[in-house]
Image (cartoon, rainbow, N blue to C red):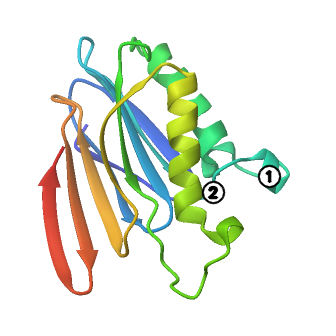
Amino acid sequence: MGERKVGIGDYAVGKKVGIISTYGLGSCVGITIYDRLTKVGGLLHALLPEASYYGNKGNPAKYVDTGLELLISDIRKIGGNPRRAEAKIFGGAHMFTNVTTEKLMIGKRNVEVAKRELKRHGIKIVAEDTGGKGGRTIYLDLSTGKVKMRRVSNGQITERVY
């Protein structure tokens, strides 16, 4: 499979081999779900928290809530069990320091909705790197479920494996 790149408002699933990645997570949220038993996993790159708040317009993968529905459904289709799976959440940065209105803090709301929806689906969150400032790039390794994260903030580069 090699590396499958996921853009904004997109998701991908896979099994056993390959990397699913997404670049430039700012206030967007990147959510990985992985079933260790079947080695089935996927990654969602969502732009906004809830589809209904924005009138359910356009691509459902653009929103955390409806995007997770798609991701979970496709994980099931290729043999994964979401109830047995683990989730990891990345992104949700506060990109604009002049924005202080709760309603406009998209990154924070993306993370809150991700946590609420994962809990509703009975999926345990095992790692999180959210908030702060700067962009993140993540790589989900389908052979292990590990996620390598690269974060750039104020010219500093940090890399971690979750």
Which residue, given by chain and number where applicable, does mark 2 sit on?
48
Which image quadrant: the N terminus?
A: top left
Judge left or right: residue 127 versus residue 81: left
Residue drawn at x 66%, y 67% as measured from the top left: 102
Q: What x and y, as percent, mark residue 116?
A: 56, 36
Q: Residue at x 50, y 39 (%)?
A: 115
- Residue 57 in view (yes/no): no
Is 127 situated left or right of 79 in this image? left
Residue closest to the eye, 140 or 159: 159
For the point 53% across and 63% down, the residue is: 107
Instruction: Tell me the number on the disc at residue 53.
Output: 1
Q: Is residue 53 positioned above or below 127 on the image?
A: below
Tell me residue 45's x, y (percent). Answer: 48, 51
Q: CA distance from mark 2 to mark 1?
A: 9 Å
Question: Is 69 displayed left or right of 157 in the figure?
Answer: right
Q: How many marks?
A: 2
